[in-house]
Image (spheres, rainbow, N blue to C red):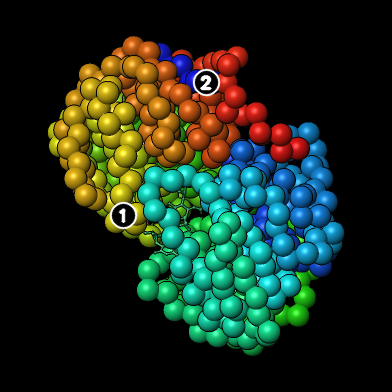
């Protein structure tokens, strides 16, 4: 299996540019299905999940053309998509966000047939709230052995109210509702930056979505959506991951191309550890010179501390002086990676949704696994700050969501390399071109 090999203990100095946001891109690309004309999307992250969703759209009949050499800009012409059925089961099963095709196809055709989504499986990931939103708009939802089927006589604007804040259900409800006649309100909506980015993209295509970023989103259905040119926001979690890495290793790094307001909760917790964070217009500088202190944090929907930063922070706090506490409030369980950190010598007690991290400075590199995307990022941070050599296997999970991670870290002085192992068959199916 391909691996990352890290010789840890090096402080990081320099600049890291942040790529476009994965969790915005994987919703905005399916949203193009709703348009009657081609759309140009810029600042796309070059990651596996984006390749997969673009391949699914191609498979559905869309024309996908990269503009320029670096694959960060693409023109998607959705006019060849003439069926509400998605049949590429393997590709859809490769990622969670393929569930956005349900909302997009329901909004376009009034019906949808989509295989079950896959993706990181750190715990049970239900989609009942998505289906509830579609039903509220007037769709009938059926679950077949291998696919989800949505049908409707006529959809109409309605009041959707969630009992749990869900990013995916909020974005899927928006996709389904933008072309539905009448007014739809989404109450207890998620407020994550990518929810706002999707609303902005839909509005660029001519939709009428108001209130994204607040608890209540109001949508006036429009008859048609037109083409547009749109640039995706920077990735809040990629930025937070490198910020945590600098805090763990020590050093001084400018994290470039970010929206600092998206990082407020991460900055606040980093400052609690004594790490210096300077905020500029579109960059943040992270400086850690003295000892890393401990802190307490609890994950919560935006503007709270992101659950997608929880494993990276636990890894970082393993190197702090003193006792830290992490409480996971978004997912039922998201601590399954902790035994991997313990193999490196981390002293962490965890039970239910709480982890107590007894920080120490002497973790030691060993062979560990990336159990999922953010768990994998946590192992990279641990490897960078630990003594000795860490070998991380199952890096395909990390590569789903981090563009050029090895190069970006090498550029700030990390001793990390990607080792290709000949016998690796994990990427054999990855011809997404
Ligand atoms: C999105 O997943 C992200 N994925 C996740 O990031 C992230 O962890 C999560 O939001 C929370 O921020 C994408 O955007 C592709 P949710 P999503 O619906 O939308 C419960 C990463 O690492 N729930 O907001 O699937 C659920 O059990 C990934 O980039 C229901 O009960 O998450 C959870 O407790 C991992 N029923 C809570 O809501 C539902 O129908 C929040 O989940 C849906 C969710």
Q: Which of pointers 2 and 1 lies earlier in the amino acid sequence?
A: 2
Mark 1: few/some/many CA within 10 Å (<14, 14-19, 20+): few
Q: Which mark is residue 332?
A: 1
- Ligand 1's quadrant is bottom left
55 to 106, vertically: above or below: above
Some atom of ligand 1 lies within 8 Å of the CB belonging to the residue at label 1: yes
Residue closest to the eye, 45 or 123: 123
Answer yes or no: is residue 18 visible. Answer: no
**Residue drawn where x is 61% and y is 29% of the image:** 427
**Residue drawn where x is 50% and y is 35% of the image:** 397
Percent x, y of residue 182: 64, 87
**Residue drawn where x is 50% and y is 61% of the image:** 168
Percent x, y of residue 158: 55, 85
Answer yes or no: is residue 87 visible. Answer: yes
Which of the image's four quarters has the C terminus? top right
- Dot 1 lies on which element? loop
Left or right relative to 90: residue 278: left
Residue marked by disc 2: 1
Left or right relative to 429: residue 258: left
């Amino acid at each position: 299996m391909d691996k990352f090999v890290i010789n840890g203990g090096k402080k990081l100095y320099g600049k890291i540019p942040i790529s476009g946001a994965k969790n915005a891109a994987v919703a905005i690309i399916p949203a193009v299905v709703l348009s009657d004309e081609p759309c140009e999307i810029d600042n796309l992250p070059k990651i596996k999940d984006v390749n997969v969703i673009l391949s699914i759209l191609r498979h559905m009949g869309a024309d996908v053309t990269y503009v320029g050499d670096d694959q960060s800009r693409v023109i998607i012409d959705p006019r060849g998509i003439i069926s509400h059925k998605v049949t590429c089961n393997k590709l859809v099963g490769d990622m969670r966000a393929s569930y956005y095709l349900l909302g997009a196809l329901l909004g376009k055709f009034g019906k949808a047939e989509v295989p079950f989504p896959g993706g990181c499986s750190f715990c049970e990931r239900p989609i009942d709230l998505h289906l509830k939103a579609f039903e509220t708009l007037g769709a009938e939802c059926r679950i077949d052995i291998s696919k989800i089927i949505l049908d409707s006589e006529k959809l109409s604007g309605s009041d959707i109210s969630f009992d749990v804040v869900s990013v995916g259900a909020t974005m899927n409800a928006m996709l389904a509702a933008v072309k539905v006649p009448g007014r739809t309100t989404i109450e207890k909506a998620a407020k994550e930056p990518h929810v706002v980015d999707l609303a902005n993209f839909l509005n660029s295509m001519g939709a009428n979505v108001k209130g994204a970023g607040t608890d209540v989103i109001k949508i006036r259905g429009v008859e048609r959506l037109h083409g547009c040119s749109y640039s995706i926001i920077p990735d809040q979690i990629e930025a937070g991951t490198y910020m945590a890495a600098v805090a763990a290793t020590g050093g001084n790094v400018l994290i470039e191309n970010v929206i600092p307001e998206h990082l407020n909760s991460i900055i606040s917790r980093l400052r609690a550890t004594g790490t210096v964070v300077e905020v500029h217009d579109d960059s943040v500088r992270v400086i850690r010179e003295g000892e890393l202190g401990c802190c307490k944090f609890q994950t919560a929907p935006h503007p709270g501390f992101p659950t997608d930063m929880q494993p990276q922070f636990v890894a970082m706090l393993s190197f702090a002086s003193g006792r830290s506490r992490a409480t996971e409030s978004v997912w039922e369980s998201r601590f399954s990676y902790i035994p991997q950190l313990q193999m490196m010598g981390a002293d962490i007690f965890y039970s239910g949704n709480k982890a107590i991290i007894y920080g120490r400075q002497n973790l030691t590199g060993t062979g560990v696994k990336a159990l999922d995307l953010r768990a994998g990022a946590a192992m990279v941070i641990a490897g960078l700050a630990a003594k000795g050599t860490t070998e991380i296997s199952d890096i395909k999970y990390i590569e789903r969501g981090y563009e050029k991670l090895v190069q970006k870290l090498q550029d700030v002085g990390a001793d990390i390399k990607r080792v290709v192992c000949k016998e690796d068959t994990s990427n054999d199916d990855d011809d997404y071109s």
